[in-house]
Amino acid sequence: MIVDVLTWLQQPGLSHFLIVSAIVFALGLYAILTRKNAIMVLMGIELILNAANINFLAFSRYSTHSLDGHIVALFVIILAAAEVAIGLAIVLNIVQNFNTANVDEIDRLKE
Amino acid sequence: MVTETILQQLVLFVPELILTGTFCLILLTGAFTKLRDYGTSTLTLIGSIAAFISVLPTIGVQKSLFAGMIAIDSFAVFFKLFSLVCLIGITLFSLHAGELKLVRTRSAEYYALLVAMTLGMFLMASATHLLMMVLAMELTSLSAYVLAGYTKEAADSSEASLKYILYGAVASGLLLYGISILYGLTGSLHYTTINHVLAVEPLSRVPLALVFVLLLVGFGFKISAVPFHSWTPDVYEGAPITITTFLSVASKAAGFAMLIRFFKLVCVNPVASVEAGYSIPLLPIDWQLLLAVLAVLTMTVGNLVALWQENLKRLLAYSSIAHAGYMLIGVVSFTDKGIASVLVYLVVYLFMNMGAFLVVMVVANKTGSEDIRTYRGLGSRSPFLAIAMTVFLISLTGIPPTAGFIGKLYLFAAALDAQWYWLAFLGVLNSVLALYYYVRIIRNMFLRESESAVPNISLTSGEVLLLGALLVPTLVFGIFFSPIVEIAQKSIVMLGVP
Amino acid sequence: MMRESIDVYTVLFYFFVSITLVSACVVVFSRHIVRSAFALLFTFFGVAALYVYLFADFLAITQLLVYVGGILVLILFGVMLTNKQINVDIKTGTLHIVPAIILAAAIGGTLVGIAWSNPWMVLPTSSSVKTTAPQIGELLLTTYLLPFEVASMVLMVALVGAVVIARREKNKKETTRDS
């Protein structure tokens, strides 16, 4: 068993990348679930998108041998940039209106 | 060679090109001319009518475009026409919206983003490739985030846009992660190729189940199904009411289009279905049951929470969640009849929901409030408005002789037909539950007198025309419903589905 | 066989993996938002290095340019601008930690389990190094032409939207501030 693990560790392959991606995904999810600051939530989303990109590229390299995964990863980066741009504009506007970026303090709409 | 085929394909892509052109033109007009509000809204109307006309020649065409990225088929055409009707309606609404009058300096961006959102819905309805689907969804969502916060000086509106983008970005992140695993499992992003791989190779259950849960988060966010609905009430209440209406009708419809096309193309066993003559599910997980549970939750939570709402915009938000649940019943049954009943319901829902929101908007313009108490005595102060609202609410409940009854009838009949008896029963039970809060509004309008002196609400001729244009179909389709049913039955033809 | 020394390639792989994971942990668990933002820099860098290991040279460069050069700068600007009124204490609070840990650990554990045990289809890989940029360019203008064009619309919408929301309007701000 231990020998298996050691030989597995010696040869980085598909599952190594998938496991890294799974851990990054879980960390991003944790950040989204726990952090109050809107910018922290956006950072958590960036982690999740990076995890998805690792998956796409790993499958592209080991499973499909096509560049489809690369193209998708490229578009994911574009989408992340667009989302962050709008997200931060909205957060700046919120800070002007509410003087805070903490999501749980912004609850006028729950009366 | 390549350029030639692209040029040939562009002929079928004219509606989208017209919308893109309108988008650019509106932005340029706003930037370089003094034409602000009326100029840009006229441009939007011209652009959407031109797009509408250019969609018409593609009726009956069945073709896959741009290397299988999108499909032109009757199903896509139906949703394109649907979202254009919504766009035209919302543009007309916007001319009468009081809250937008304060921010007329930005109206070019407002209309441009509405057009961009419609373009996104076009692509959502026709995407047959996962990357294209995500991009289309993001185009719609990004425009919607901004539009929800369009009256940015109002705290409610900026709060709505913040909640919308946080929930939306999380949903699309989870969706993308799900897609990445699906890509690893099947090695492709084309709906049809994924379907072939799923049909041929037995895939392990756990990863596939996880993929579908992650995908459902993305879809569920778009159609605001419980438990992914928590953004809906806040966004619907905080956003400008024209945008709320657009989100609750057009955006939801596009979400359903995306959901139906995905399940129809990916999760149906192609060979067995041809032999049997009806759709046979493919996956090792029982996704129909999963969707059924989602439908029940969505209906029940939407209706139950709506019972306690005092703000009419928020009440209609919960009611629109419940309506998404009814429509999910049609998706669950998944027969041709089921899909057709969803389309019928969407047409009906377009008129009655837009009508109800229009009344709320008109009242809010004059009184500045959306509280249910402002509606007290509306029956005597403004009979036409009150009667129109009553018709829309009766139709939303699903009582004959309104169009809403026909919509519900078809949905439940399709569920019974596909032997989802308990689902249909819970649907009927929910309609009864919904009666309570709709009637509460009607009671307030006719049986209660207002305590304070409330200004009389006089309607402009434009508002009367708009109300009439929504009121007539709501009543007429309750009696002469065969045309919509026929259109819906013709519109379920999808490229690649046997 | 076990005794064979591990080569530099593998050592460097684990070095980059640990950079990615450790900095991602700092991003998530640090209570200081500026520290989180800077740790994110190292996460993006580590992920870019992993892309190189996956023979994705073009994507690695894009990751560095767009994420590190664009998104991260934007996030840092956001952090600085939103925290100006509470200069001293730029900390971020947390909510309901225990259920979040359970949920994230459960999903992460499932994913790791899947990654470890699922029979992924693996084709034999060639070790010959080829640059991917020409092929990506060709794909973008043939198969992926429509997504490429739609992406330009998405960016345009993001541009217009960010300007609409973030632009300060001087003339009538005070009158409509309180809704």
Image (cartoon, grey):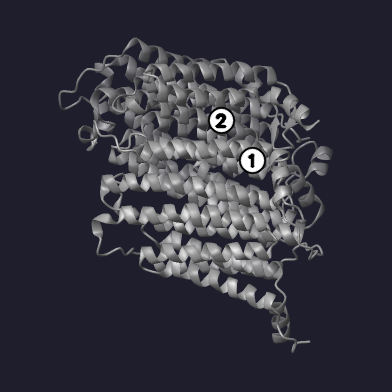
Q: Tell me if residue A45 can be seen.
A: yes
Q: Residue furthest bottom?
A: C3
Task: Return the x and y of residue C167 as percentages of the image width and height.
Answer: 34, 38
**Which numbered marker is on residue B132?**
1
Q: Residue at x 54, y 44 (%)?
A: B295
User: Callout 2: residue from which chain?
Assistant: B
Q: Quadrant of residue B185?
A: bottom right
Task: Return the x and y of residue B369 as percentages of the image width and height.
Answer: 26, 30
Q: Residue at x 61, y 34 (%)?
A: B123
Q: Quadrant of residue B453?
A: top left
Residue A61 shown left or right of residue B397 in the figure:
right
User: Mark 1 Cα within 10 Å, few/some/many (few <14, many 20+)?
Assistant: many
Of residue B337 and residue C132, the one placed in the foreground of this image is: C132
What amino acid is labelled 2 in the image?
Answer: Leu
Quadrant of the frame with the N terminus of chain B: top right
Residue B99 shown left or right of residue B347 in the figure:
left
Helix, strand or loop at mark 2 = helix
Q: Which residue is mark 2?
A: B119
Q: Residue at x 42, y 54 (%)?
A: C75
